[in-house]
Image (cartoon, rainbow, N blue to C red):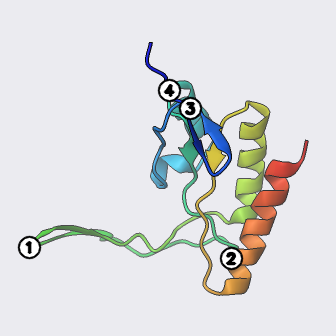
Amino acid sequence: MTKLSVNIAGLKLRNPVMLAAGILGMSYRTLKRVYESGAGAVVTKSIGLKPRTGFKNPTLIEVECGLLNAMGLPNPGVDYFAEEISKLKKCRVKVIASIYGFTTQEYVIVAKKVWELVQTP
């Protein structure tokens, strides 16, 4: 039997397959389902400090060389995701948080909130 487990920056995964950050990474139920279907880890939708609606449609357009996608980072904010990540932790789902900020301080605040969440017993 082939072993696919990997260790990425101290995070041991059963395999290197991960859900990419995006639309499926917003809810506990969807992230849990992807993990239970065999992914080694799931990645949240990009999380910011405050809720953000993102850009109005169209957010996907065709250009000469392919497609251009610009969603504008829509998300319900880190406080909403705290609850979702807490539920996943209880189920032992390996979660990687995709975060963003508009300033260094915003990155720090969001990263700290997520870090404190995953460190809680």
Mark 1 to mark 2 CA distance (whole Å): 35 Å
Which residue position is annotated with label 4?
38
Q: Position of residue 40 (x, y in %)?
A: 54, 34
Name the quadrant of the N terminus: top left
Of circles 4 and 1, which is in front? 4
Name the quadrant of the C terminus: top right
Q: Position of residue 72 (x, y in %)?
A: 45, 74
- What mark, if any, has residue 64 been given in the picture? 1
Mark 2 to mark 4 CA distance (whole Å): 30 Å
The earlier-in-sequence mark between 4 and 1 is 4
The earlier-in-sequence mark between 2 and 3 is 3
In the rendered structure, which amino acid carries the disc numbered 2? Tyr
Decide: few, some or many residues near mark 2? Use Cα within 10 Å; few <14, some 14-19, many ≥20: some
Mark 3 to mark 4 CA distance (whole Å): 5 Å
Which residue position is annotated with label 3?
35
Please, what secondary structure does the residue beneath circle 1 have? loop
In the rendered structure, which amino acid carries the disc numbered 1? Glu
Please, what secondary structure does the residue beneath circle 4 have? loop
The earlier-in-sequence mark between 1 and 3 is 3
Which residue position is annotated with label 2?
107
The earlier-in-sequence mark between 1 and 2 is 1
